[in-house]
């Protein structure tokens, strides 16, 4: 939820927040209404959502539980790229602990470390590819 508010506060036209935990969805929805932020909430397992969802996004930010195994983390970019969810020049960002490395993924670009937290960045298709 916090990153959804951050994106909206920086001018995102719309945000979709996916979480399977109903209290989190309710909190995000209530806070978005109070702040008048354009956040749509979807209660779903994110892996099932990514596997079946169609759409194009400029930014996809994933904040899965840090305790996931590395192969579970890798499912996120795999689903994003298999379903072509990134718009031209879009970017995928996955937040994880410093104990996980996603650098082996073919679309991995770079990572930024903040203490024990890491943001891994993945390139989307360039506008020339589409």
Image (cartoon, helix red, strand yellow):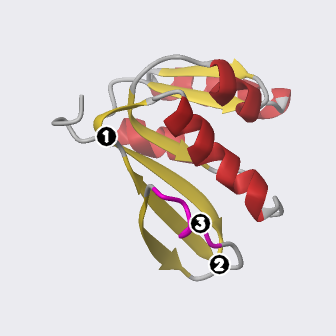
Q: Are marks 2 and 1 in contact (CB under 8 Å)?
A: no
Under circle 3, the secondary element is loop
Instruction: Work out whether 64 lies above or below 1.
Output: below
Closer to the eye: label 3 or 2: 3
Quickly name the residue at label 3.
102
Q: Which span of residues is magenta-colored? A: 101-106
Does residue 1 appear in the picture of this structure? Answer: no
Closer to the eye: label 2 or 1: 1
Quickly name the residue at label 1.
125
Is most of the magenta stretch helix, strand or loop? loop
Q: Is residue 102 magenta?
A: yes
In the displayed structure image, the side of residue 68 where residue 34 appears, left or right: left
Q: Is residue 127 magenta?
A: no
- Determine the image quadrant of residue 50: top right
Q: Give the class, few, some or many, for how many residues have Cα within 10 Å of label 2's Cα (few <14, many ≥20).
A: some
Image point (66%, 54%), residue name:
74
Instruction: Work out whether 96 lies above or below 116.
Output: above
Mark 2 and mark 1 lie on one chain; the one further toward the N terminus is 2
Counting from the top left corner in percent of width and height, residue 68 is at: 81, 58
């Amino acid at each position: 939820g916090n990153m959804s508010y951050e994106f909206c506060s920086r001018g995102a036209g719309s945000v979709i927040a996916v979480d399977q935990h109903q209290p989190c969805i309710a909190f995000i929805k209530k806070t978005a209404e109070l702040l008048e932020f354009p956040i749509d909430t979807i209660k779903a397992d994110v892996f099932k959502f990514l596997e079946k969802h169609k759409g194009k996004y400029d930014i996809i930010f994933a904040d899965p539980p840090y305790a996931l195994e590395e192969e579970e983390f890798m499912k996120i970019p795999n689903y994003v790229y298999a379903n072509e969810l990134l718009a031209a020049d879009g970017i995928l960002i996955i937040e994880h602990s410093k104990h996980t490395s996603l650098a082996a993924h073919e679309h991995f670009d770079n990572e930024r470390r903040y203490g024990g937290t890491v943001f891994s960045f993945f390139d989307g298709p360039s506008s020339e590819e589409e």
